[in-house]
Amino acid sequence: MKVVVGSNDKISKLIAEDFINVVNKKENAVLGLATGTSPLQVYANLVKANKEGRVSFKKCTTFNLDEYVGLEGTHNQSYRYFMNENLFNHIDIDKKNTNVLLGVGDYKKFMNQYDDMIAKAGGIDIQILGIGSDGHIAFNEPGTSFDSLTHETELTEQTIKDNSRLFNDISEVPTRAVTMGLKSIMNARKIVLIATGKNKAKAVYGLIKGPISEDMPCSILQKHKDVTVYVDEDAYSLVK
Ligand code: GLP
């Protein structure tokens, strides 16, 4: 596990370069994408690089980590909406090659096909992850099996509280989600994780130093052979 410490500005640029390098080596690369505030600057850098002609996503396929159960893709807090607004609408990707789990309708059927779809596309070449304050990655909350594939899950009170800042009221935050599993994530060939701010310090400690335990879902990444953890000083403070 490689660790890079720097400002959000710096680490977001470095992660964008990791993605650009992968795509420039393999034009039909499969990209694993995440939502949350952490990757926002990474996506802004990718949009800029695409507009400048430094990278093209025309032949890429993407798979997002997760989605809230109960939200339509048009809801402004759905992860489909987030991805369209912050990345897909601004780059040259073919929208039909962008996959985000569904949260309504026949979402279970789609969820059950997701890992096979990823495998058929050739597997994820590079996966970006954020991290929850309780150490969750995607929506794999503490206690999730390391063998999990894409599944439906209940969100913890902590996650509902953390994510309520983006909703008008905590009562509007969905309590369930569909998410790629920990095994699905570990299948990615390369993983980059971004964490900033003091409220991530405990999770980052568990990620880098903690025992590998299902109580700290991110700790499984210690077993992956190509992970780079990008953190700012605050998120790194307990490790230091
Ligand atoms: C949500 C997402 C995660 C994300 C986490 C952290 O729970 N499901 O994928 O990593 O939030 O979000 P943020 O980057 O906004 O702190």
Image (cartoon, rainbow, N blue to C red):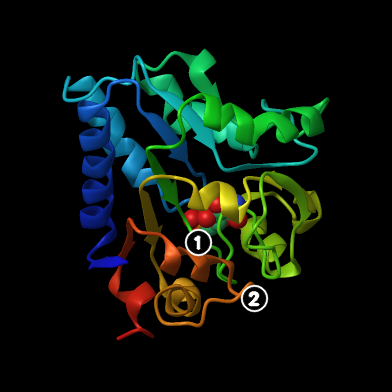
Q: Nearer the viewer, residue 172 or 174?
A: 174
Report the number of discs. Answer: 2
Looking at the image, residue 49 sits to the left or right of residue 115; the answer is left
How crowded is the residue under tag 2: few (<14 C-alpha within 10 Å), some, or many (20+)?
Answer: some
For the residue marked with disc 2, what is the amino acid? Asp
Name the front one of labels 1 and 2.
2
Q: Position of residue 11 (x, y in %)?
A: 25, 56
Residue under circle 1? 131
Question: Considering the image in quadrants, where does the C terminus appear?
Answer: bottom left
Residue 52 horizontal/vertical position (percent):
17, 22
Mark 1, ligand 1, within 8 Å: the answer is yes
Q: Is residue 112 above or below residue 205?
A: above
Q: CA distance from mark 1 to mark 2?
A: 14 Å
The quadrant where ligand 1 appears is bottom right
Which residue shows up at 24% across the image and 43% down it? 18
- Please give left or right for residue 89 compared with residue 139 in the image: left
Numbered tag placed on residue 215 in the rendering? 2
Q: Hey, which quadrant is residue 22 in on the image?
A: top left
On screen, 101 above or below 134?
Answer: above
**Coordinates of residue 163 in the picture (x, y in percent):** 63, 57
Q: Tag 1, which secondary structure?
A: loop
Badge 1 density bin: few <14, some 14–19, many ≥20, Cα 10 Å: many
Name which residue type carries label 1: Ile
Q: Residue at x 74, y 59 (%)?
A: 155
